[in-house]
């Protein structure tokens, strides 16, 4: 297939673009700078500059001749700026206005498929119960952009555009995910990050597994799918997995349940989410290379340790 990728130089895009190329697809991706364009070209993609994510007409012209678009564009702030309202506004605009422009341009260009990145943190806290795609979701401020992006993809399908595949991804880990690299650096300084109840669950996904899921999504029936590893860990076990990968012992763990005091800004990270990937595995045959964060963090450490 000829696939257009938005967000192709971001955390997941840096893994998805070469995965798509390796699978035999022709890939074109947006690039905002010459350096990012050069990186895409080295990965085997065709880089396109001078087109804005918010320019419907420009995107439609760029999409012409392609079979599908994969929208991976986000502006998620780093851990140090996660509480910044301004940084969150930037991400909200990308999610709301950017995804609308992508969906509309895909309709204008006659594409047959839209793949839209979303997150599994949309679900309500379910304690130790398994969560599938039919589980209840929760509307809180930080989910507004994700719900808008999902709605725009669904609008593409509902108005005759073809198939829309929504991937609700878990917590990213792996080289290229800035917050993941920061967690690893903290672990090397004996700090174990636990947000919320230590017995609550974290559903994560290594970036390389997220990338292989993007490839699989090109052949998936239209719908919404959870893309997480096979074995969600408790937050205590997750912190231990990071420490093991860093070859340290945590001297300090936190903030734990005190993180609840920060309210909606951290609710996506403090809740317990034991998410199942069974539906996506069944429909596509996809399986993660790293079945849990234990293996994912060991692989991450090998990439990040000189």
Image (spheres, grey):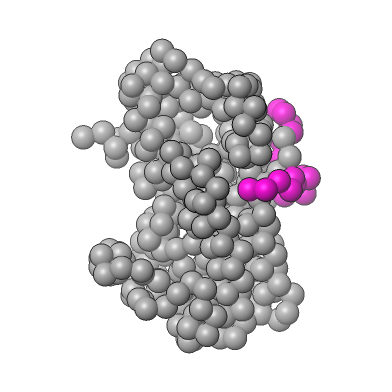
Vertical order, 57 against 75 (above or below) = below
Which residue occupies 51% across, 78% down?
A: 55
* Residue that extends furthest to the left in the rendered view of this protein: 306
Residue 272 sits in which quadrant? top right
Q: Residue 79 at what x, y percent from top left?
A: 45, 39
Vertical order, 281 against 264 (above or below) = below
> Quick check: 131 left or right of 303?
right
In front: 209, or 234?
A: 234
> Quick check: 206 left or right of 108?
left
* Residue that extends furthest to the top in the rendered view of this protein: 251
Q: Quadrant of the C terminus?
A: top left
Q: Main secondary structure of the magenta part?
A: loop
Vertical order, 186 against 273 (above or below) = above
Q: Residue 81 at what x, y percent from top left?
A: 46, 42
Which residue occupies 51% across, 37% down?
A: 291
Q: Residue 27 at what x, y percent from top left?
A: 40, 72
Which residue occupies 54% across, 80% down?
A: 56
Answer whether residue 44 is magenta in the image.
Answer: no
Which residue occupies 70% across, 65% down?
A: 151
In front: 181, or 113?
A: 181
Residue 50 sits in which quadrant? bottom left
Answer whether residue 133 is magenta in the image.
Answer: yes
> Where does the magenta region start and end?
126-142
Residue 299 showing in the rendered view? no
Residue 86 showing in the rendered view? yes
Q: Residue 265 at what x, y percent from top left?
A: 61, 39
In front: 203, or 264?
A: 264
> Quick check: 206 left or right of 88?
left
Residue 21 sits in which quadrant? bottom left
């Amino acid at each position: 297939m000829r696939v257009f990728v938005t967000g192709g130089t971001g955390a997941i895009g840096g893994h998805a673009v070469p995965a798509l190329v390796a699978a035999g697809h022709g890939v074109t991706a947006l690039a905002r700078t010459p350096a990012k364009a050069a990186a895409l070209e080295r990965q085997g993609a065709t880089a396109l500059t001078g087109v804005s994510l918010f320019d419907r007409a420009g995107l439609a012209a760029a999409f012409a001749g392609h079979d599908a678009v994969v929208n991976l564009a986000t502006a998620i702030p780093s851990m140090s700026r996660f509480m910044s309202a301004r940084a969150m506004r930037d991400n909200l605009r990308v999610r709301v206005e950017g995804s609308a422009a992508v969906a509309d341009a895909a309709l204008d260009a006659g594409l047959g498929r839209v793949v839209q990145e979303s997150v599994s943190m949309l679900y309500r806290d379910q304690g130790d119960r398994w969560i599938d795609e039919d589980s209840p979701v929760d509307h809180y401020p930080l989910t507004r952009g994700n719900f808008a992006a999902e709605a725009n993809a669904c609008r593409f399908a509902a108005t005759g555009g073809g198939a829309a595949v929504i991937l609700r991804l878990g917590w990213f880990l792996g080289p290229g995910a800035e917050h993941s690299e920061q967690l690893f650096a903290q672990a090397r300084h004996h700090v174990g990050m636990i947000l919320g109840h230590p017995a609550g669950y974290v559903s994560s996904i290594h970036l390389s597994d997220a990338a292989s899921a993007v490839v699989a999504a090109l052949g998936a029936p239209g719908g919404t799918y959870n893309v997480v590893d096979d074995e969600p860990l408790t937050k205590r076990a997750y912190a231990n997995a990071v420490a093991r990968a860093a070859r340290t012992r945590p001297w300090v763990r936190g903030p734990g349940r005190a993180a609840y005091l920060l309210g909606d800004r951290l609710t996506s990270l403090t809740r317990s989410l034991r998410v199942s990937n069974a539906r996506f595995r069944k429909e596509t045959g996809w399986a993660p290379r790293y079945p849990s964060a234990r293996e994912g963090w060991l692989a991450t450490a090998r990439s990040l340790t000189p």
